Image (tube, rainbow, N blue to C red):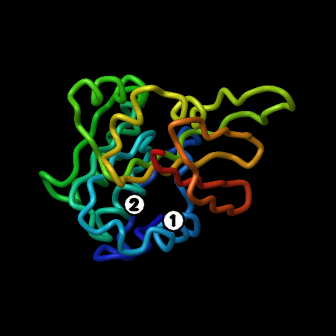
Amino acid sequence: MRVTGGQWTGRPIAVPPGQAVRPTPDKVRQAIFNSLGEWILGRTVLELFAGSGALSLECLSRGATAALCVEKNARTAQVLRRNGAAAGRGRWDLRVQDALTALRQLAATERVFEFICADPPYGDKTTLGRRSTSWAQQLLDDEHLPRLLAPGGRLMVGHAKRDQVEIPDPWRERKALKHGDTWIRFATLS
């Protein structure tokens, strides 16, 4: 895996071994950042379920000012630290903890971000008449998440096509990108 655009184009991104991490594929990241365009310049970023940190690194490479990654798995976080070292101190930070716990703690500090992105582990297929219980749905339903988005900010959540994620209030879906089994949903606060 490599950074797909910006000042670090082509820079390798290490991925933890095994199947515990499913990095956002290069083509999907390219589509995300083609969609964002120059909007990302000067923005602060929160990446949840960071894994390799590929989304944060893409943001920083393309002109974001700072990124905070949240990753629960300590072994994965070791690889993530090595990837983040390229960004330099003061621009990149890491919290090793559960994403939903981090949301609650960050909201308590009144910290805000202009771009919040998450491509969490995919959920199971949502059966007809049942609401998704996936990580993507839990994020969208979390009461603390809206408090972390700065005015005019954007939220991006990835999920599997088979997982019928609902965009609840106070979120308003602005765009959806579909690449194979991957759906990327962009939302703002209403």
- The residue tagged 1 is 32
Give the class, few, some or many, for how many residues have Cα within 10 Å of label 2's Cα (few <14, many ≥20): many
Q: Residue furthest front?
A: 190
Above/below status of 183 relative to 108: below
Residue 74 in the figure: left or right of residue 143:
left
Residue visible at 39% across and 28% down in the picture: 144
Q: Quick check: 41 left or right of 24?
A: left
Which numbered dot is residue 13? 2
Q: Residue at x 16, y 58 (%)?
A: 88
The image quadrant of residue 122 is: top right
Secondary structure under badge 2?
loop
Q: Residue at x 32, y 52 (%)?
A: 114
Q: Nearer the viewer, residue 5 or 108?
A: 108
Residue closest to the eye, 189 or 175? 189
The location of residue 86, given as percent across then percent down, is 23, 60
Cα separation, mark 2 vs mark 1, equals 17 Å
Sequence-wise, the earlier of marks 2 and 1 is 2
Q: Quadrant of residue 175?
A: bottom right
